[in-house]
Image (cartoon, grey):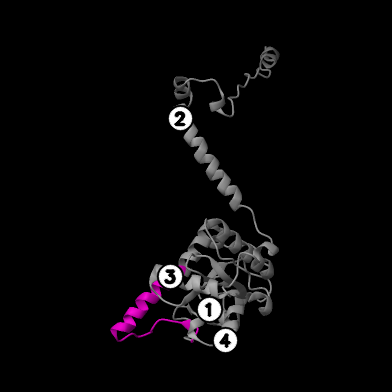
Amino acid sequence: MADVVQWNLGPLPRKERVFRGQDPLQMNFSDEQLRQRFRFGRRALNTFQTCSEMIYKDQLQRCTALSVEEQDQFIKWPCTPDKLNATKNGFYEKTGFPNVIGCVDGTHVRIQAPEDDEPSFVNRKGFHSVNVQGICDQNCLFTNVSANWPGSCHDAHVFKTSAVGIHLQDQYTSIEQGVVLGDSGYPCRPFLFTPFRQPREQREHNFNRAHITTRCTIERTFGIWKQRFRLLKTGVSITNKYCSYKLLFQVSVEDMNKCSANYKHGWRSNQQNLESFFC
């Protein structure tokens, strides 16, 4: 009896699988049949298909990383009178602060603890990071990115040793060349404006209010950057610091290239030497 039962418990015949067509709009269904099958008519399905194609196309374009050669045409400091005037006018039209050519700030990007010189990568918040300096224009586009220093370095030191900082210290002659706005963590210089630490007069309060309104452009830029690449929030799992730096540069270029629909100004990595970085 057991043998009979075991023989009857053989493999059951599988039901033939029926696959629906990939595109219901190409099938000869009436609107009523489409509503019965998909709960939407032909017009609604056409709309959904168009929207999904636009979304997927945008995502596929954003996933295209840029090479080092391609980065040279996207991150570029405004060095010609036309670009400088365009940046100044853009900031003035948006925030009312005159003669601004950029806003600078630093942000910490979490990384895995490196094998070499591990303590220097621990920042003031207690985790391992790279202190990434960014300078942006009025359209939230990076004009300079520097990821050459570990998290323990101060923002002022990163700016002082960057290509833009060296250029401004050596070549700055008058306020007509424009100014960069930074927070109170930076030293006040003829080319770098910081807010009053203890404003007393009303005009000093007005200056600080206009300064903060304009300088927050770089904070929004960092927000767009990290929102586009959540890896920069959760942490870069690369122990080699040079690989981390290279990744950060590529990500910043790709992010701003894809998140900004209309851009006219180029960007350029400041890993280049001073002569090739500035026109």
Mark 4 vs mark 1: in front: 4
Decide which of tag 3 and tag 1 comes sooner along the chain.
1
Three-letter code, disc 3: Cys
- Between the residue at mark 3 and the residue at mark 2, the CA separation in whole angstroms equals 44 Å
Query: Is 142 located above or below residue 185 in the figure?
Result: above
Decide which of tag 4 and tag 3 comes sooner along the chain.
4
Three-letter code, disc 4: Gln
Query: Is 235 located above or below residue 181 in the figure?
Result: above
The residue drawn where x is 70% and y is 64% is: 69
Decide which of tag 4 and tag 1 comes sooner along the chain.
1
Report crowding for label 4: few under 14, some 14 to 19, many 20 or more residues within 10 A (C-alpha).
some
- Between the residue at mark 4 and the residue at mark 1, the CA separation in whole angstroms equals 16 Å
Report crowding for label 2: few under 14, some 14 to 19, many 20 or more residues within 10 A (C-alpha).
few
Decide if residue 197 is on the left or right side of residue 73: left
- Between the residue at mark 4 and the residue at mark 3, the CA separation in whole angstroms equals 24 Å
Q: Nearer the viewer, residue 212 or 92?
A: 92
Place of residue 270 in the rendered image (x, y in percent of width and height, measured from the top left): 63, 73
**Residue at the spot of label 3:** 216
Mark 3 vs mark 2: in front: 2
**Residue at the spot of label 4:** 169
- The residues colored magenta run 190-217
Mark 3 vs mark 1: in front: 3
Decide which of tag 2 and tag 4 comes sooner along the chain.
2
Place of residue 217 in the rendered image (x, y in percent of width and height, measured from the top left): 45, 68
Decide which of tag 1 and tag 2 comes sooner along the chain.
2
